[in-house]
Structures are given as structure tokens and as C-alpha cells.
Amino acid sequence: MEKAENKTKSSSEVTNHSQSEVEIGLSSGVEIQQYPNYKPSGVTWLGEIPEHWGVKKFKFVLNQSKGLTITKHNLGNEGVCCVNYGEIHSKYGFELDITKHKLKCVNKEYLKTDSNSLLNKGDFVFADTSEDIEGSGNFTHLKSSDKIFAGYHTVIARPKIEIESLFLAFVFDSTSFRNQIRKKVKGVKVYSITQSVLKETNIWIPLLQEQIAIAHFLDDKTTKIDEAIAIKEQQINLLKERKQILIHKAVTRGVGSSSGVEMKDSGVEWIGKIPAHWEVKKLFGICDFVRGNSPFSKDELLSTGDYVALQYGKTYKVDEIDDKYNFYVNDEFYKESQIVNFGDTILVSTSETIEDLGHSAYYNRSDLGLLGGEQMVLKPKKEKLDGHYLYFISKIFSKELRKYATGIKVFRFNVNNLKTIYASVPPLSEQKEISAYIETASKKIETAIGLKQQEIAKLKEYKSSIINSVVTGKVKVC
């Protein structure tokens, strides 16, 4: 093998994200060294590694076992904490700390009956299924000594050789490792990450003191990146609050200057005062309600089809069903009573979190939709109510619906609850004016949110780049 020369590069040569580096306190002029000699790793996506590093199969580095065989119904608020596959995908990243993360629990009796699923400090818990290829290989790493179970649809991986577990966490989070999993997983709509898939992946291993130095370096740098991301996420939340205030003011006060406009008390607490010529009406009198019961599931959604499939797991993630929403079903699921038309508003009536309960989406398509379960549709009576105005009102009264929420693990409201909701109703021409005003004014806010999201994406890309460069030995930090 041809010996590689000892080299130094500026950080701007290693990554193109110099702006992100400055943002987290890393100057673009920092010299980055490489190891003096490299060798082929024999692993696709890994390439060359430092000459003195080793490569081992996953099965020779970690033992594997399964999490508890339970369902969501076995979980409660008391007992022994339990981390499940959905939480690995959505909440924790790769470090699980019971002092920071609120977990559901299982009965303490499981300590007697299934202690094999109890985690040790330094253990890894992989989600054994993923709805997308990008999520294949998602895991969490237990950094505390607290009693925590691995729950349903998880694989426990426990180091069986002396190794720095935080270094191993960065290895598992690198694209070089994840690509090995993505190549082997099977599935179309749900990807299965089995023990057999994991055990044949390759892990590269430096000397222990190098592992520790790499782990400390990456922990420091990624913490700074995460802090920068958190600041931008907070800024996005503030922009969303500003948009909510904009909508609330418009649907209760109107647009333009309110000076000189006679106001009256609406008699509804969340509405407050409204222009004197407006009315306050129950939703039940100005729109029709349809409860979703089409039987299709997320596993039956198609990329093309006869009808737009409004499955609640998809609709709660968007504010508008437009041409970018590409989930369909065919005629076998057709029900005339479940048709959704242009101008209708969809409400999520069941949710695992109280914040998502009552989330609304505007149906902005000319082709027909079919309403899935756990949702309701509001169909405006067009002689009384503009569909777009109804959607904007829904963004405000959804908070009122949460007051009716029942359930502990899953929250819901029903049609009777919806019938109690009032709305402020201006003349139809004014409704359209208000809708147009909100649409125009909120575009500036949405543009600002989009820019922040792009900045977050760049920071995440930079984080992935620096992890992969350092943990694979392309960059020497010790």
C-alpha cells in the first residue's frame, strides 16, 4: 500500500460549511491534521482508515437481545422507565438521560420476569423498524446508571469488549456505519432492522486512548452545534407564535385599523371583543361535520391513485393538503360519506400528544380526498362561511377543543365537543378579505421560518460531516 503523507488542511477544505463553523465558534482557519499512514478498510463507504486501526464485525464487539414484548397499553406513569422504538425515532437522539427525558413506565414486576431487557449504563437501543430508509439505524445510548427497560420493537446492543461507549455512539451515528444498515434492511413501507442485519455490519476500532480523545472532541463540537440548532428552533417557535397572534387578531378584530370601529363583547372568552356588525355563531350552524371512518391504514397508502388519502398520521404533519401531499388510495376504499372537497378543513381528533390534538389542515386541491379515521372534516356552508376563513378560525379554536380532551396515553375529542365551539363570523365578503390578508401577511413569517429551517438543515449536515470525518480517521484530533 502506498503510504499517505502527513497532511494538514484548513477546516474549509474538509467541509464547505464554514458559515456554520463560525456560528458555533469554530474558526474556518483552524488546521486539521491527518494520520501519517492509512490502509484500505475493506468496508464499503468507509474507504481507508489509519494504519493502526482495526475492523471487527458488530457481533464480535456487542451482544444483542430484544426489548420487552409489550404494547403501548402496558405503559403508564409509574414504575420502571421504558424506552420504545417510536421514542428513539422522534425524541432522544443518541443519548438517553432519565434526568432530561420524560419516559412512560412499566410495572416493577417486569424486574422479576424480564430482567434481560433492563439496560446497563453504556448500552445501545436500536429501533428495529423504521418508516423510512433514513431512519434505519436510529438508536439511543444510555449514559446514566438509572433503571430503564428497552421496550417494544427494540434491539439491545451491549459491549462485550473494552471500548469507549461514547466513541461507539459516534460510530453508529456516522454515515459510514448507517449506510451499511441501509444497504441490508428490507421492506417497502416499513424497513426492518433485525439482529442479523446489525451483527454483520463492520465497526472500526482505534486504540482506547484515541477512542476517548475522539469521543471528547466530538462531544464538545456537536454540543455547540446542538446549542446553535436549539436557538434557531426557539426562533422558529417565536415566529410561529407571531403567526398565531396575527391570525387571532384578524379573525376577532378584522384587518386594517380598528380605530373608529364600534366593538361589542362577543360573550366568548377566547374571542373577546369583535366589531359590532359581526356575529357569533356555533360551528354546528355554519358548517357540516363528517367523522372519518375510511378503513385504510398507513401501510396501504400509494404514491399514485384514484383519491387523495387523508390518513391522520400524515395530515397532522402538514397545514395544507396541496399538490405536494402525495398519498393516495384506489376505488376499493371509496365511501361517498367520506369525500373531502376543496375548501374543507380537516381536524385531527385523536393524538398521542395534547399539542397535536385538534391540528387542522386546509384541503387545497380540486381532486377528491377520502377521510381516514381519527379525524373530522368541517364542510363550510358556502352561503354563510368561506372555507379559507374557517381554516384560519380552526387554528384558534383548536386550543379550546383540547379542554375536552379525554384519555391518558391517547387524547381525543368527539363531535359533541365540536358542537359547543363558537366562531366569530363577519359578512362573507369580509371573511374573504381577512383570509387574503392573513395569507399575504403570514407569507413573510413562513419565509423567515423557511430560512431558519434551511440554517438548521445546514448545521445538521455539518454535524454529520464532522462526525463522519473524525470518527473514521479522515481527520486526526489527538
Image (cartoon, rainbow, N blue to C red):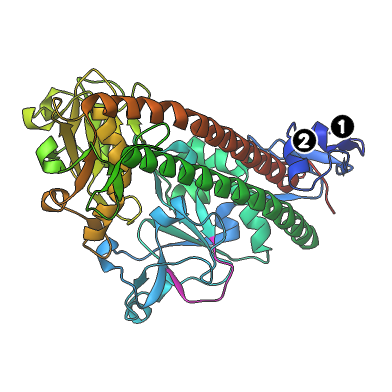
Of residue 439 and residue 1, the one placed in the foreground of this image is 439
Instruction: Give coordinates of residue 279: x percent, y percent.
Output: 19, 40
155 left or right of 121 in image: left
Q: Which residues are magenta?
A: 141-149
Instruction: Give coordinates of residue 298: x percent, y percent.
Output: 27, 38
> What is the three-letter code of the residue carrying label 1?
Glu
Mark drawn on residue 18: 2
Instruction: Give coordinates of residue 417: x percent, y percent.
Output: 15, 53
Magenta region includes residue 45: no
Q: Quadrant of the N terminus?
A: top right
- Circle 1 packing at 10 Å, graded few (<14), some (14-19), many (20+), is few
Chief secondary structure of the magenta portion: loop
296 left or right of 40 in image: left
Q: Nearer the viewer, mark 2 or mark 1?
A: 2
297 left or right of 236 in image: left
174 left or right of 282 in image: right
- Circle 2 packing at 10 Å, graded few (<14), some (14-19), many (20+), is some
Instruction: Identify residue for label 1.
Output: 2
Of residue 341 and residue 288, the one placed in the foreground of this image is 288
Instruction: Give coordinates of residue 269: x percent, y percent.
Output: 27, 55
> What is the three-letter code of the residue carrying label 2?
Ser
Tell which residue pokes out farthest to the left in this image. 336
Residue drawn at x 79%, y 39% is 39
Q: Quadrant of the C terminus?
A: bottom right
Please report whichever mark, 2 or 1, sits nearer to the chain's N-terminal start.
Answer: 1
Tell which residue pokes out farthest to the top in this image. 366
